[in-house]
Image (cartoon, rainbow, N blue to C red):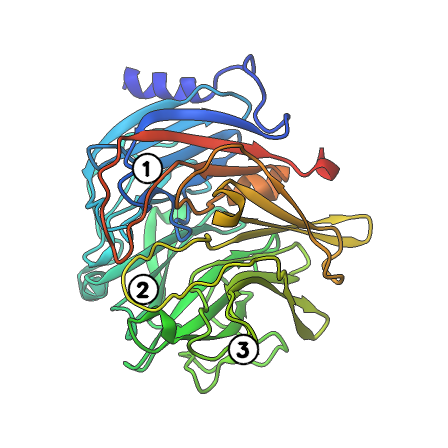
Amino acid sequence: MMMMKFMFMSCLMALCFSAAGQGNPSVSTIANNGWSNNSINTVIFRKNALATHQKIQYAGYYDADQYVVLACRNINSDQWTVRRSQYKGDAADAHKSISIQVDGAGVLHVAWGQHNNPLNYARAIEPGSLVLGEKEYMLGERERELEQKVTYPEFYRLKNGDLLFFYRDGGSGNGNLMINRYVVRQHAWQRVQNNLIDGAGERNAYWQTAIDEKGTIHISWVWRERPDVASNHDLCYARSFDGGVSWEKSNGERYELPIRSGNAEYICRIPQNSELINQTSMFADKSGRTVIAGYWRDKDSNIPQYHVVYQEGSAWKVQNLNFRKTPFSLSGTGTKRIPISRPQIVTWKEKNAWCTALIFRDEERQNKVSVAINKNITINSWTFTDLNSDSLGEWEPAYDTELWKSKKRLDLFIQKVVQIDGEGKANNKPSDIQVLSWKPVSLK
């Protein structure tokens, strides 16, 4: 108990250290023994790699011995408290990343090691603690069979402090989207959706989710017909105002559940074999206006480009950033070595303009942490900058969503990693686990 109190107090240390994010940018090192033989610690579908509750920021990663490691700090401190958990994961499979979130009571929840296998989930033994309890299933015996083929575990915090847990039940090309809810006052999970998006055994949805400041849940997704990444196609949308129970299209038309390819709202038509990537990012501001980032190749080009899809009134519009010069192909299965990362995207309001930042990595920019900024999303005009000076290999951006919502501070989990094509494993030395903090100049 004394150790737990010590760790918690370490996270609450006085603000005597340099304030992260007040520079432009700053980097804080958590540890120097991160697993780096593939991209598992930095895949974009970590929801989340970083999570803040009140003034405490938490991080999760695999160390060089493949243990699940948790850390925390005061958001205004560079000093981290680090604890290696009792759990290990198969870090050789880059799908099996760690996802974390903190509920409204301050309890840390962790899921790890998922790629079509039984659920690996545990929560901290008390608020503020890094000590995990026993591994547990979320639901009772009757529904436990739907926690046997879990992939892509994702946590999202609702406005009242409850958590949502999204995951895929089934495999690539024939999986379904499931949603659970953790009710803080009951200290228990309950099922919200058994099969929100149904691939009908022929396809599956690769989704991205955003929850706006009012609590509305926004989902967009691409369909995949086969395990081959090249079969990704189209971009669809749904939203929920009641915690995921009922869903509607952007025009207010109510969905009859489950959502299938025949009744989905298609906000951007993109054919197969367009190098369309799955699992990117979306953001919704406090008014519910939604922006989605991804990349694909237009039919008159052989070069995949970053695109931004955004809502303007009742219409969906698309911007092609169109700055890349190098072609590549996504054909094949497994985790791929790709010359660019999947992007993250955030927005903020400046005067009457809707400002947008797209965070990415590109070999054309020496694999640094790069940001494209648009000061008015209705005009296709972007400026580019790098937030660091060294290559991060095959890193993809993951950021602290709650800290951005509350402070408009962008904290990115960074690590130099290698990804060998087709789920390969390198033989690298461990590398630094760090957090890069940055604020757009206009928000300082």
Q: Earlier in the sequence, mark 2 or mark 3?
A: 2
Q: Quadrant of the C terminus?
A: top right
424 in relation to 313, above or below? above
The answer to which quarter of the image holds residue 83 is: top left
The residue that appears at 34% across and 78% down in the rendered structure is: 225
Horizontally, residue 87 falls left or right of residue 263, namely left
- Most extreme residue toward the bottom is 262
User: Which of the numbered marks, if any, corresponds to residue 299?
Assistant: 3
Q: Counting other residues with Cα less than 10 Å from the Cα at mark 1, is it few (<14), some (14-19), or many (20 or more)? A: many
Q: Nearer the viewer, mark 1 or mark 2?
A: 1
- Quick check: marks 2 and 3 in contact, CB under 8 Å? no
Residue at the spot x=50%, y=59% of the render? 326
Labels 2, 3: front one: 3
Q: Can the viewer see residue 392 in this picture?
A: yes
Q: Amino acid at mark 1?
A: Tyr
- Closer to the chain start, of discs 1 and 3, is 1
* Residue at mark 1 to residue at mark 3: CA–CA distance: 39 Å
Disc 2 target residue: 168
Q: Position of residue 218 (x, y in %)?
A: 53, 63
Q: Is residue 299 above or below residue 16?
A: below
| Left or right for 57, reference 150 | right
Disc 3, SS: loop
Q: Which kind of residue does numbered mark 3 sit on?
A: Lys
